[in-house]
Image (spheres, rainbow, N blue to C red):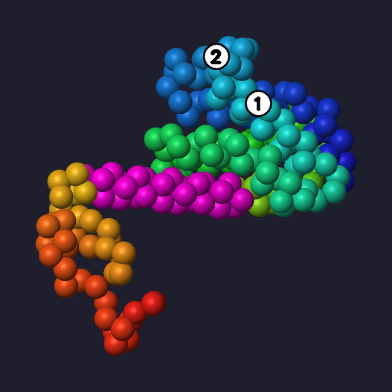
Protein backbone atom coordinates (compact mmCIF):
# COMPACT_ATOMS: atom_id res chain seq x y z
CA UNK A 1 0.00 0.00 0.00
CA UNK A 2 1.14 3.55 -0.74
CA UNK A 3 1.01 4.64 2.88
CA UNK A 4 4.22 2.80 3.71
CA UNK A 5 6.20 4.80 1.17
CA UNK A 6 4.93 8.00 2.78
CA UNK A 7 5.63 6.69 6.26
CA UNK A 8 9.23 6.11 5.24
CA UNK A 9 9.47 9.66 3.85
CA UNK A 10 8.21 11.11 7.16
CA UNK A 11 10.01 8.64 9.44
CA UNK A 12 12.29 11.13 11.22
CA UNK A 13 9.46 13.57 11.81
CA UNK A 14 7.15 10.84 13.12
CA UNK A 15 9.75 9.30 15.44
CA UNK A 16 10.63 12.71 16.90
CA UNK A 17 6.95 13.54 17.52
CA UNK A 18 6.29 10.10 19.00
CA UNK A 19 9.28 10.45 21.32
CA UNK A 20 7.95 13.84 22.40
CA UNK A 21 4.60 12.26 23.31
CA UNK A 22 6.49 9.64 25.32
CA UNK A 23 8.55 12.32 27.09
CA UNK A 24 5.34 14.17 27.91
CA UNK A 25 4.39 11.44 30.37
CA UNK A 26 7.17 12.70 32.66
CA UNK A 27 7.43 16.00 34.50
CA UNK A 28 7.96 19.17 32.45
CA UNK A 29 11.64 19.31 33.43
CA UNK A 30 12.07 15.60 32.76
CA UNK A 31 10.35 15.92 29.39
CA UNK A 32 12.63 18.74 28.27
CA UNK A 33 15.70 16.83 29.42
CA UNK A 34 14.66 13.67 27.58
CA UNK A 35 14.19 15.58 24.34
CA UNK A 36 17.23 17.87 24.50
CA UNK A 37 20.03 15.97 26.21
CA UNK A 38 21.98 14.10 23.52
CA UNK A 39 24.47 12.26 25.72
CA UNK A 40 23.10 8.71 26.22
CA UNK A 41 25.01 8.33 29.49
CA UNK A 42 23.35 11.42 30.96
CA UNK A 43 20.01 10.68 29.33
CA UNK A 44 19.53 6.89 29.20
CA UNK A 45 15.73 7.18 29.10
CA UNK A 46 15.79 9.44 26.06
CA UNK A 47 18.44 7.37 24.30
CA UNK A 48 16.56 4.12 24.93
CA UNK A 49 13.26 5.62 23.77
CA UNK A 50 14.69 7.08 20.57
CA UNK A 51 16.49 3.88 19.66
CA UNK A 52 13.48 1.72 20.52
CA UNK A 53 11.00 3.90 18.64
CA UNK A 54 13.26 4.05 15.59
CA UNK A 55 13.49 0.25 15.43
CA UNK A 56 9.80 -0.31 16.19
CA UNK A 57 8.61 2.25 13.65
CA UNK A 58 10.84 0.75 10.97
CA UNK A 59 9.04 -2.54 11.50
CA UNK A 60 5.55 -0.99 11.60
CA UNK A 61 6.20 1.09 8.49
CA UNK A 62 7.43 -1.79 6.36
CA UNK A 63 5.38 -3.16 3.50
CA UNK A 64 5.30 -6.62 5.05
CA UNK A 65 3.58 -7.46 8.32
CA UNK A 66 6.12 -7.15 11.14
CA UNK A 67 7.32 -10.30 12.84
CA UNK A 68 5.56 -10.24 16.27
CA UNK A 69 8.57 -11.71 18.08
CA UNK A 70 11.02 -9.22 16.55
CA UNK A 71 8.60 -6.41 17.36
CA UNK A 72 8.46 -7.53 21.00
CA UNK A 73 12.25 -7.66 21.20
CA UNK A 74 12.59 -4.09 19.94
CA UNK A 75 9.86 -2.84 22.26
CA UNK A 76 11.02 -4.77 25.32
CA UNK A 77 13.72 -2.36 26.64
CA UNK A 78 11.36 0.62 26.69
CA UNK A 79 8.59 -1.34 28.40
CA UNK A 80 11.00 -2.74 31.00
CA UNK A 81 12.04 0.81 31.76
CA UNK A 82 8.42 1.83 32.33
CA UNK A 83 7.73 -1.26 34.43
CA UNK A 84 10.32 -0.32 37.07
CA UNK A 85 9.07 3.26 37.28
CA UNK A 86 6.00 4.58 39.08
CA UNK A 87 3.49 3.91 36.30
CA UNK A 88 0.30 1.90 36.53
CA UNK A 89 -0.18 -0.49 33.57
CA UNK A 90 -2.39 1.90 31.59
CA UNK A 91 0.17 4.69 31.97
CA UNK A 92 3.09 2.38 31.32
CA UNK A 93 1.94 1.51 27.80
CA UNK A 94 -0.08 4.64 27.00
CA UNK A 95 2.72 6.08 24.84
CA UNK A 96 1.91 3.54 22.09
CA UNK A 97 -1.51 4.94 21.15
CA UNK A 98 -0.47 8.53 20.24
CA UNK A 99 1.46 7.06 17.31
CA UNK A 100 -1.83 6.97 15.42
CA UNK A 101 -2.36 10.71 15.88
CA UNK A 102 1.29 11.48 15.10
CA UNK A 103 1.10 9.57 11.82
CA UNK A 104 -2.17 11.17 10.81
CA UNK A 105 -0.74 14.65 11.45
CA UNK A 106 2.47 13.85 9.57
CA UNK A 107 0.53 12.57 6.55
CA UNK A 108 -1.99 15.41 6.54
CA UNK A 109 -0.99 16.58 3.06
CA UNK A 110 -0.99 13.08 1.59
CA UNK A 111 -4.40 12.38 3.11
CA UNK A 112 -5.85 15.62 1.74
CA UNK A 113 -4.51 14.87 -1.73
CA UNK A 114 -5.95 11.37 -1.65
CA UNK A 115 -2.60 9.61 -1.77
CA UNK A 116 -3.33 8.00 1.60
CA UNK A 117 -6.85 6.66 2.15
CA UNK A 118 -8.72 5.84 5.32
CA UNK A 119 -8.29 2.18 4.44
CA UNK A 120 -4.53 2.74 4.35
CA UNK A 121 -4.65 4.40 7.77
CA UNK A 122 -6.82 1.64 9.22
CA UNK A 123 -4.27 -0.94 8.08
CA UNK A 124 -1.49 0.91 9.88
CA UNK A 125 -3.68 1.54 12.94
CA UNK A 126 -4.25 -2.20 13.21
CA UNK A 127 -0.49 -2.67 13.52
CA UNK A 128 -0.40 -0.08 16.28
CA UNK A 129 -3.21 -1.92 18.08
CA UNK A 130 -1.20 -5.14 17.90
CA UNK A 131 1.80 -3.25 19.23
CA UNK A 132 -0.22 -1.98 22.19
CA UNK A 133 -1.30 -5.53 23.08
CA UNK A 134 2.31 -6.72 22.93
CA UNK A 135 3.36 -3.76 25.09
CA UNK A 136 0.79 -4.66 27.74
CA UNK A 137 1.87 -8.31 27.79
CA UNK A 138 5.52 -7.31 28.20
CA UNK A 139 4.67 -4.79 30.92
CA UNK A 140 2.67 -7.28 32.98
CA UNK A 141 5.37 -9.95 32.62
CA UNK A 142 7.97 -7.47 33.85
CA UNK A 143 5.84 -6.42 36.81
CA UNK A 144 5.25 -10.05 37.74
CA UNK A 145 9.00 -10.65 37.67
CA UNK A 146 9.58 -7.59 39.87
CA UNK A 147 6.97 -8.80 42.40
CA UNK A 148 8.59 -12.26 42.52
CA UNK A 149 12.02 -10.75 43.12
CA UNK A 150 10.69 -8.50 45.86
CA UNK A 151 8.85 -11.37 47.52
CA UNK A 152 12.00 -13.50 47.39
CA UNK A 153 14.04 -10.67 48.89
CA UNK A 154 11.54 -10.16 51.72
CA UNK A 155 11.46 -13.89 52.43
CA UNK A 156 15.26 -14.11 52.55
CA UNK A 157 15.54 -11.09 54.85
CA UNK A 158 12.81 -12.45 57.12
CA UNK A 159 14.45 -15.87 57.37
CA UNK A 160 17.79 -14.28 58.20
CA UNK A 161 16.20 -12.18 60.96
CA UNK A 162 14.44 -15.21 62.44
CA UNK A 163 17.64 -17.24 62.36
CA UNK A 164 19.59 -14.45 64.03
CA UNK A 165 16.94 -14.24 66.76
CA UNK A 166 17.17 -18.00 67.32
CA UNK A 167 13.55 -18.43 66.27
CA UNK A 168 14.11 -20.43 63.11
CA UNK A 169 16.49 -23.18 62.14
CA UNK A 170 17.03 -25.64 59.33
CA UNK A 171 15.83 -29.15 60.22
CA UNK A 172 17.45 -31.50 57.69
CA UNK A 173 14.76 -34.15 58.03
CA UNK A 174 11.75 -31.88 57.58
CA UNK A 175 13.03 -28.62 56.10
CA UNK A 176 12.81 -25.15 57.58
CA UNK A 177 10.89 -24.96 60.86
CA UNK A 178 10.08 -21.97 63.06
CA UNK A 179 11.32 -23.12 66.45
CA UNK A 180 14.18 -22.27 68.80
CA UNK A 181 17.49 -24.00 68.22
CA UNK A 182 17.53 -25.37 71.78
CA UNK A 183 14.18 -27.10 71.18
CA UNK A 184 15.48 -28.69 68.02
CA UNK A 185 18.70 -29.75 69.78
CA UNK A 186 16.65 -31.65 72.38
CA UNK A 187 15.53 -33.94 69.59
CA UNK A 188 12.19 -35.45 68.67
CA UNK A 189 11.97 -33.93 65.20
CA UNK A 190 13.71 -36.70 63.27
CA UNK A 191 11.48 -38.71 60.99
CA UNK A 192 11.26 -42.41 61.75
CA UNK A 193 11.69 -45.12 59.15
CA UNK A 194 7.96 -45.85 59.48
CA UNK A 195 6.96 -42.28 58.62
CA UNK A 196 5.00 -42.45 55.33
CA UNK A 197 6.26 -38.99 54.37
CA UNK A 198 9.92 -39.88 54.79
CA UNK A 199 11.90 -39.22 51.66
CA UNK A 200 9.26 -36.92 50.10
- Characterize the local packing of mark 2: few (<14), some (14-19) or many (20 or more) Cα atoms within 10 angstroms: few
Query: Measuring 47% from the left and 18% from the top, which residue is drawn there?
Result: 30
Does the magenta segment cover residue 163? no
Residue 97 locus on image (x, y percent): 59, 41
In primary-sequence order, the first of circles 2 and 1 is 2
- Nearest the eye: 113 or 132: 132
Where are the magenta residues, as a range?
Answer: 133-161
- Nearest the eye: 135 or 95: 135
Does the magenta segment cover residue 135? yes
**As displayed, is residue 132 above or below residue 18?**
below
Give the residue pinned by disc 2.
Answer: 42
Residue at disc 1, secondary structure: helix
Find residue 57 and report its image quarter.
top right
How far apart are the two marked residues, 2 and 1, measured between alpha carbons?
Answer: 14 Å
Q: Is residue 102 left or right of residue 161?
A: right
Give the residue pinned by disc 1.
Answer: 50
Query: Measuring 85% from the left and 48% from the top, which residue is drawn there?
Result: 64
Tell me, yes or no, if residue 94 can be seen here.
Answer: no
Query: Measuring 32% from the left and 47% from the top, which residue is drawn there?
Result: 156
Residue 163 locus on image (x, y percent): 21, 49
- Characterize the local packing of mark 1: few (<14), some (14-19) or many (20 or more) Cα atoms within 10 angstroms: many
Main SS, magenta residues: helix
**As displayed, is residue 6 above or below residue 45?**
below
**As displayed, is residue 186 above or below residue 13?**
below
Residue at disc 2, secondary structure: loop
Amino acid sequence: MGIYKHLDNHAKEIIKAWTARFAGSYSSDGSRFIMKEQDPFNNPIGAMAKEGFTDVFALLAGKNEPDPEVLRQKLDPVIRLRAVQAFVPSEGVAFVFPLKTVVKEALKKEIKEGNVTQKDLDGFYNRVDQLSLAAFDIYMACREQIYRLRASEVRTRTLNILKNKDILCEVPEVGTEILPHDVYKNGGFEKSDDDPDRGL
